[in-house]
Image: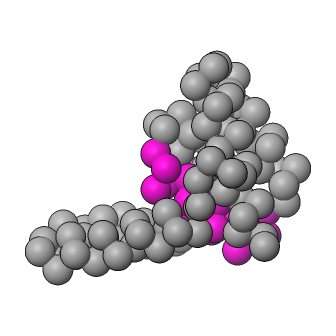
Amino acid sequence: MWVDWKNTLSSLRKAASVLAEKNPPLVKAYQGLNKSLGEGKALDAKTRELIALAVAVTTRCDGCISSHSAAARQAGATAEEVAEALGTAIALNAGAAYVYSARAMEAFNQFGE
């Protein structure tokens, strides 16, 4: 196992709470941006999380991978759907996306344990 993704997500949330305490307007604005995505009608939550996970891979953001792996699992995504979404990231980002896709699959599977 490369990373303990559940611990990564927990650590991220703790660190983010410190940021929220020190800069509430910034965090409120960020939360508003994320909330607005849930108000869309064209994409369901699972599709949005699959897209977000693929983007997390291309941007190499471990915090994003942990967060969106958990959210994709919660939204009902299957391992096959995650693998297909990650295939798009790989096609767009080649080698680096391949390595981070392996990391994202590991994260997704850990949230199923």
Tell me where residue 90 sits by quadrant. Answer: top right
Q: Residue furthest right?
A: 80
Q: Is residue 4 visible?
A: yes
**Residue at left offset 30%, top offset 65%:** 30
Whole-percent x, y for residue 104 in the image = 66, 48
- Rendered image quadrant of residue 44: bottom right
Quarter of the image where one finds residue 96? top right
Q: Nearer the viewer, residue 41 or 20?
A: 20
Q: How many marks on residues?
A: 0
Residue 64 in picture, x, y percent from top left:
49, 54
Q: Which residue in the rendered view is the most extreme toward the left?
A: 22
- 72 in magenta: yes
Q: Read off the magenta span.
A: 61-77
The residue closer to the viewer here, 113 or 69, is 113
Instruction: Give the prevailing secondary structure in the magenta stretch.
Output: helix
Q: Is residue 52 left or right of residue 20?
A: right
- Give the residue displayed 49% in from the left and 50% down from the top: 62
Does residue 44 appear in this view?
no
Judged left or right of residue 74, residue 78 is right
Magenta stretch contains residue 106: no
Q: Is residue 83 left or right of residue 59?
A: right
* Outermost residue toward the top in this view: 94
